[in-house]
Image (cartoon, coloured by chain):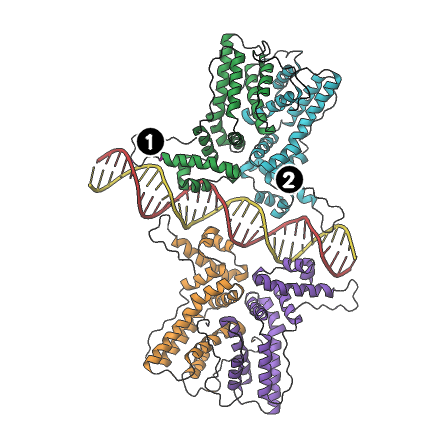
Chain colours: A purple, B orange, C cyan, D green, E yellow, F red
DNA sequence: GAATAAACGAGACGGTACGTCGGGTCTTCTG
DNA sequence: CAGAAGACCCGACGTACCGTCTCGTTTATTC
């Protein structure tokens, strides 16, 4: 995310929204063309037609530019509208997430950002705040509503639900590089909503040659 | 892993095993001192007292050096001796794995390599072949023996066992950065061996601020 | 010589005159300390306290840096004032040249640049334009004035005069490494102007161990 | 020149004349293809199909290899037969020299070796001994014969004759890169012999418009 | 004829410098 | 006065050769 510094009533030229969008678009395009390792601040500035300083002024690293680009693409957010029951809310959440990650490039960027979060601890913190926690909060909203409604299963525990859902998703993305498909959605729903859980609803891998 | 090029009966000086070990040791030490981002080929060469070319000759990237260093440290391999029953074999496997990853530095390197595998696709392939598949094959050996013995539970399916075991481990390492402890071993055993599984044995996350 | 690219009304930071002088001074000093073969761009940059790129940006080779350093030292130019007669003009020119080359380091650099001009053809062109032609034109000015005055001997031909004067100088510098002394000036004047013949010439005995 | 170490009655394998010739030929060819700056010991070894050590064993530098290659080409030597008079001896010497330097590649190598002699003092010594002194001694032989004969002009002094002859030749080769032509031979003879004029040419009434 | 000795092609070694790339900072000019 | 242009210092990159040091092999000489 960019720095969003307050601009109210300050003297001087306003931040150029045009430059900002050009930078985010350039970083998104360049990622697809040269990959994350080949992505450079210099390259983004050249493609965006701006000076390097304009990037350094607003973002701390190329990973943050990319994270911001994802947000602007409107690809990161999932609705949490009320669909009447826990099961349907959860299905809607999973399908939204599945839709989010259906694009190859978006998946690649997500994996890359998660990877960069391992390597750059400072970015890791910003990534968790700006993305991971938001996603987790969305699911928490669904669970809270279910609890108020009274249709939340007694187990697994809420925190375990969070771990299962996101753990399975990330494992597929990072280690097996399998797509998130509707079979997975069904399996997860069967495990998390029904009681007793069906025996086959554990996080499933179909390609053993790709897994850890 | 390094290139292991065939050396049978060729003319010319032999590869120096001394240099190889110095390089692996240097990369391991330096990782601890300056982190992965601060790790450079130049730095490794300087610490190892060798020329840069000697590294470039045998390893394609600093990540491969680190991967090789892990292997040489003897930290990567887990025994699959027969302990009499599926339950005991599985417990031994999990405890070996837990012991493998008990060191902060080893965990950091594993996370880093998994991260680098996302960013550098070529290294990703080598990482899967040289590490992930090997680990998976070890657990598959345990499962196969159980099937021959006749004490393999009818479910979850073998491939699902693999996903649960390694998925949970990696999720803890990458996302929550929790240590692998004996509670986790117990929970996994309860889920995978006993029937019916206790309701709380799903991959658990305790710190929501660290999870996905 | 450096690139002297036009800087009129462009945006961006100006070339740092401070860096330029530091680089020229460093190359001059280092030449004296480690010789031309030991002179490196890295060494110059380190001594000058600048980045290598700043050198590569403005000079194509270490020889060009050295050539520029000589020019800045103000060591390269010889006056061609009118002394009344061809003989006296020529004597003045030769004595100025002799004075130019009285310093050990300046001689060494000149020999080195002439040598490098043989080896690097592109530099050779620049060396001729920036130095040799300038010197040759100076002598041509003296000859032209003599012709207008009418006291130019009928032979040797003017072009041969140029060859003999500079040929002898360079031959001494390059091949015999003899200093340019007043005996040589006298002998050349006697040969080229003819009357009056040289006063008492005990001709300079060459050192046979050093000669061609 | 190569090291020519004594091989009399020693045990062990003899020096391979085949390798020696392959190395000299390779260095001569490569000089023409990539120039002196691009010439490397590794390149010569590869082209000659030999190991680098075989070159280092016998020659101290690439310049020495090239010098040896010239010698083997038989291009370096000039006869000093008696032609009856100083003028005719001198003309023969100059024309032989002119013939020596008629090949573009031979000239280039001579210039290069003279250049390298400036830069590498050790090679400079070997170059003087193996080439320059030999040439100078040849001309000295002519002068000594003239003195015995009594037809040596009173001036210029013998050492100045040497300086002028070789100086002019080298200056043309190194600085102006002009070919050595018969006009130069005539002009030098006229200047150095004076009276009587050379038998086969009328003394050059210089045409001042004749461009150098 | 075995042992010794030297030179051979091959190729890895520890190094040094190359010329380039990019990071992040610091002017200078333009809109 | 923000922003583009671009020079600055810095450091690592991956490469090219340097000159040296094994290797295993091929001659020659000596014992």
- Image coords of residue D207 (percent x, y): 67, 18
| Front one among A176 and D185 | D185
Q: Which residue is mark 1?
A: D7
Q: Residue furthest top?
A: D150
Magenta stretch in the rendered image: D5-16
| Front one among B52 and D127 | D127
Q: Residue furthest bottom?
A: A150
- Left or right relative to C122: residue B15: left
- Left or right relative to F3: residue D189: left
Q: CA distance from mark 1 to mark 2?
A: 51 Å
Verify whether residue D12 appears in magenta: yes
Q: Which secondary structure dominates the residues rendered in magenta?
A: loop
Q: Residues within 10 Å of mark 2 (few under 14, many from 20)?
A: many
The mark lying in front, picked from 1 and 2, is 1
- Residue A128: which numbered mark, if any? none
Verify whether residue B158 appears in magenta: no
- Image coords of residue B119 (percent x, y): 54, 64
- Image coords of residue D3 (percent x, y): 40, 31
Q: Is residue C208 in sight in this rendering?
A: no
- Which residue is at 69% across, 62% downward? A57
Q: Is residue B61 in sight in this rendering?
A: yes
- Image coords of residue D95 (percent x, y): 53, 20
Pick the quarter of the image with the N terminus of chain C.
Answer: top right
Callout 1: helix, strand or loop? loop
Q: Chain of mark 1?
A: D
Q: Which residue is mark 2?
A: C24
- Left or right relative to D10: residue C116: right
Callout 2: helix, strand or loop? helix
Q: Chain of mark 2?
A: C
């Amino acid at each position: 995310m960019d720095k969003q510094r307050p601009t109210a009533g300050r003297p001087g030229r306003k931040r150029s929204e045009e430059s900002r969008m050009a930078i985010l678009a350039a970083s998104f395009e360049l990622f697809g063309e040269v990959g994350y390792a080949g992505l450079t601040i210099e390259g983004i500035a050249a493609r965006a037609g701006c000076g390097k300083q304009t990037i350094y002024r607003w973002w701390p690293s190329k990973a943050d530019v990319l994270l911001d680009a994802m947000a602007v693409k409107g690809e990161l957010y999932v609705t949490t509208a009320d669909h009447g029951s826990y099961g349907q809310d959860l299905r809607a959440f999973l399908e939204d997430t599945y839709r989010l990650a259906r694009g190859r490039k978006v998946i690649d960027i997500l994996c890359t950002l998660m990877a960069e979060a391992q390597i750059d601890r400072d970015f890791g913190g910003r990534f968790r705040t700006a993305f991971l926690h938001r996603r987790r909060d969305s699911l928490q909203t669904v669970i809270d509503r279910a609890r108020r409604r009274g249709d939340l299963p007694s187990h697994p525990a809420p925190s375990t639900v969070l771990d299962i859902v996101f753990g399975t998703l990330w494992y597929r993305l990072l280690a097996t590089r399998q797509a998130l498909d509707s079979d997975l959605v069904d399996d997860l729903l069967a495990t998390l909503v029904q009681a007793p859980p069906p025996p086959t609803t554990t996080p499933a891998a179909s390609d053993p040659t790709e897994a850890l």
